[in-house]
Image (cartoon, rainbow, N blue to C red):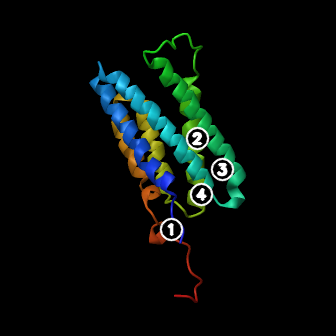
Amino acid sequence: MTSNPVTVRWSALAGPVLLLFYGVLRLLGGVFTNLGHLAFLVGLLVFALLVTGLRALVPPGSRRLATIAAGAALAGLALLCAAILADLPFDLRETPGVPETAGLTLFPVGALTLFGLLVAARRLPAWTPLLFGAGIALSLLELALLPAGALLILLALGPLRRHTPEPALRPRLASGLR
């Protein structure tokens, strides 16, 4: 019986919670904004751990595509980290324009590809990429909706937080071995 590695289980919880924390602190504004940016930065790093762990869960026949998808997601996360660092009150304002839009595209596309590969391998339910995509779309639609988007992402990643896959997702025994 396989189980999700502890890094995947932990990051599937911590990443969305930090995103939720960022969204709430951002709504509060004022002195909470910088704390929210720091939470978002740490959350992005946690999502990088998740992406790396997801790539390892993909079956060997799909590893090439999984590596490309993970690379795209990690590149997107790096671009988003650079954008957040530029927003912090450090002396980073001289940083040349960070292509934040590319980060906002590469991360979800790479992550959704990994989720799709895991759905095809019967390691995740089909609703995981759907809820994740809806959470990302909601967050991008309006930043005030970021907490709601984070909650959708938290729900989407629920199956990854389980120690063992759900019975419906476990490999089926040969028909004669009941």
Q: Is residue 79 visible?
A: yes
Which amino acid type is marked by label 3?
A: Ala
Residue neighbourhood size for the residue with mark 4, other residues' Cα within 10 Å, grouped as few (<14), some (14–19), many (≥20): some
Q: Earlier in the sequence, mark 1 or mark 3?
A: 3
Q: Measure the C-alpha gap from mark 1 to mark 2.
A: 24 Å
Label 2–label 3 contact, CB within 8 A: no
The x and y percentages for residue 43 are: 45, 37
The alpha-carbon separation of the residues under discs 1 and 4 comes to 14 Å
Q: Residues within 10 Å of mark 2 (few under 14, many from 20)?
A: some
Q: Amino acid at mark 1?
A: Leu
Task: Give amino acid for label 4.
Answer: Leu
- Name the residue carrying label 2: 109
Q: In the image, which disc is placed on residue 169?
A: 1
**N-term mark: 1 or 2:** 2
Asked if the residues shown at circle 2 and circle 4 are in contact, with their CB atoms under 8 angstroms apart, the answer is no
| Residue kind at label 2, given as amino acid type | Val
Query: Residue under circle 4?
Result: 57
Q: Determine the secondary structure under disc 3.
A: helix
Q: Which numbered disc, 2 or 4, marks the residue that appears first in the sequence?
A: 4
Horizontal and vertical percent position of residue 32:
31, 24
